[in-house]
Amino acid sequence: MTPVFPVDGTLYVGGYGQVSEIPDEDGAIRRLFELLDGTRTVGQVHRELAADFPKVTEAEVVAAIEQFDEAGFLLDEGASAEGLLDDYELARWARNINFFGSYSRLSDNKYRYQRRLLDARVTLLGLGGLGCHLLLDLAAMGVGHVRVVEFDKVELSNLNRQILYRDADVGQPKIDLAVRRVKAFNPRIDIETIPRKLNSTQDVLEAVADADVVISVADRPKMEINHWVNEACVSAGVPLVTGGLDTQRLVYFTMIPGQTGCIECWRLGVFRTDQVSATLLSEKRERQIGGDNAAFVPLVTMTTGLLLGETVRLLTGVAPPIAGGRLMQVRFDDYQSTEHERWERLPDCPVCGDKAAPAAARPDRPAAVAAGQ
Ligand SMILES: [Zn+2]
């Protein structure tokens, strides 16, 4: 039960950073809240309330409980973790579970959200600045299974943001170092590694097989990687969460196959409606997610927080994703979060449209979308 304060005929119901005001001249609502402590059936609540307020019907009590539940005022203290989480999981993710409880309705079980994370499979493409923070925080959240793809070695200039590596690691391959450090942080996480460069849609397809969500923060090869990842995720039917830094701003978006437009829908839409951008694109100065020149850790961690938020939304269903089919941006100037672009699924899109062949069926065309357009 959330805290309730009566003041001069108004009931103030608090919780989770918001206070709601409910008119309550006669005190009936306040009494109803007192009775909703989890020890009574609806019939008992009505009978006890009617003792003081005889006009109240049981139907009104039921409607009020539904409204309170919808508003998030009611907590199901009887939810059980039995069969969902063991003692270690209950203790390690206690604060997650309290967070999920804040979103739970009486018909939900807050422990189930954590179970979904523990059972989830995420493919993470890239273990650079964003990827380091993402992998560590996926482990912190309790995502159970992660497949990581990275071919690169540690450089000294990585260490302003790539927190899984040390000075002594310079020159060493990143992937094994990252896995060792994250496994030390959370020994229960299952991490599968693909220690090579992605060179085609087929390569990406292998990396995203069986994933529930793909997070792509790989930025090479610059021209092709987003197209390969897009084709593979559409073909495999796996939602994609991606984003990156653009010097003073961050951008991110979510692509859900069959629901939102894909990256090619976005690109085609720009070609058809925006002459300036179309010219830039045709000159191969393609829009880039992620840049090599500047990378500042406050923006890195803001980005990874937003990408993880989308990932949790998709994996657990606790709330809908924010950035489906729209490019969100946050500028370092003012931290304002705004929609920068929005696009719809195009029926004639060669990747996700009605007549598109699954990419899996055409491995001979690994860069089909990138090439020649
Ligand atoms: Zn498309």
Image: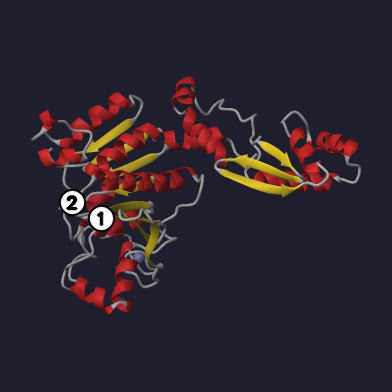
Q: Position of residue 42 (x, y in %)?
A: 79, 37
Determine the residue located farthest toward the front in the rendered image: 8
Which residue is identified by label 1? 248
Q: Are marks 2 and 1 in contact (CB under 8 Å)?
A: yes
Residue name at image x 47 percent, y 23 percent: 91
**Which residue is at a point 21% across and 71% down the rendered structure image?**
281
Is residue 105 visible in the rendered image? The answer is no
Above or below, 104 against 294 in this view is above
* Circle 1: residue type: Gln
Q: Secondary structure at mark 2?
A: loop
* Mark 1 neighbour density, 10 Å: few (under 14) some (14–19) many (20 or more): few
- Residue at horizontal 49 percent and vertical 23 percent from the top: 86
Q: Which mark is residue 182?
A: none
**Residue 123: quarter of image:** top left
Position of residue 63 measured from the top left corner of the image (x, y, whole percent): 76, 48
Left or right: 307, with 277 as reference point: right
State how far apart marks 2 and 1 are (Cα).
Answer: 8 Å
User: Which amino acid type corresponds to the residue marked 2 in the rendered image?
Assistant: Ala
Please give left or right for residue 267 compared with residue 76 in the image: left
Q: Quadrant of ligand 1?
A: bottom left
* Residue at image mark 2: 294
Q: Residues within 10 Å of mark 2 (few under 14, many from 20)?
A: few
Q: Residue visible at 49% across and 51% down?
A: 320
The residue carrying mark 1 has its beta carbon less than 8 Å from ligand 1: no
Which quarter of the rendering shows the C terminus?
A: bottom left
For the view shown, which residue lies furthest in the top direction? 87
Q: How many marks?
A: 2
